[in-house]
Image (cartoon, rainbow, N blue to C red):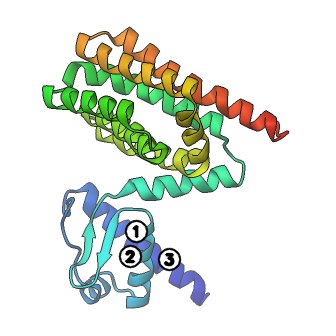
Amino acid sequence: MARQEAGRAYQKVIDSIKRKIICNEVKLGDNLPPERELAETLGVSRTSIREALRTLEVMGIITSTQGAGNVISGNFEKSLGESLAMMFLVQKIDYRQISELRCGLEKTMIALAIDKISKEQTDLLESIIEDMEKNTDDTANVALDEKLHYTIAMAASNPLIVTILQALADVMHLFIKDLRKKIIAEDKGKKRLQLAHQHMVMCLKAGDKIGAQAAIEEHFQLVDENLRLDYMMKNTTF
């Protein structure tokens, strides 16, 4: 009985903070009231307040720091990425499903970016491609690959797409980082990947949505082909 009461109190705190966010009583960057004030206002124990705040932090809604208190942060990339990673680990989803979702989102992303991208962003993309051509360090090139995709995502000016794609990218990096380095290390794979990147940027500058989306498909097709080969070599069903 006591445990049920504690559970209801903890949920009461979470629901109260959610309502404050929905009603714009607190916004991104705002501090929540101190624990004692929350406890008195809601009529619950400080233990229930702390439990609720820990849950909200895990969810990415708040960030708790000593001295600054509890701040509405909206840092969902980490919590979303961790959830996807756990789903991957318990085999509720596999890499192919993540890749299909990411490819679909990136095709939408690049179509949006064509209409919104700035000269500074296209200049940055061209600089990234030049760096990838010159760079012989595979780890650095993987980072440049991620930077290129992130720059295009930012150019799309859709925070939701950026958040979801970043979470998916983090999961992919966690599980297939060695495979990505292998693709970049091999001359044939590196050349195909580089051509896909060049095609993306060229189409972005030209306003060619169909061509840009085709370049995204080529990029993911290359990774998927290598993933299938990697699974076959390990005698694992894809």
In x, y percent, where is residue 95? Answer: 64, 39
**Residue at image mark 1:** 56
Q: Nearer the viewer, mark 3 or mark 2?
A: 2
Q: Quadrant of residue 226?
A: top right
Q: Residue at x 55, y 27 (%)?
A: 187
Q: Are marks 3 and 1 in contact (CB under 8 Å)?
A: no
Please state if 127 lies on the left or on the right of 81 as rendered.
Answer: left
Q: With 129 as the anchor, is 214 left or right in this view?
A: right
Residue denoted by label 3: 8
The residue under label 2 is which amino acid type?
A: Leu
Query: Which of the 4 image quarters holds residue 112?
Result: top left
Real-space Cα distance between discs 3 and 1? 15 Å
**Marks 2 and 1: CB-CB under 8 Å?**
yes
Q: Position of residue 147 (x, y in %)?
A: 34, 40
> Residue 109 lies in what quarter of the image?
top left
Q: Three-letter amino acid code at disc 1?
A: Leu
Q: Which residue sits at x=58%, y=89%? A: 2
Residue type at the position of mark 3 = Arg
Q: CA distance from mark 2 to mark 1?
A: 5 Å
Please, is residue 169 above or below residue 108 in the view? below
Where disc 3 sits, the SS reads helix
As helix, strand or loop, the secondary structure at mark 1 comes to helix
Q: Which numbered circle lies on residue 53?
A: 2
Q: Which mark is residue 183?
A: none
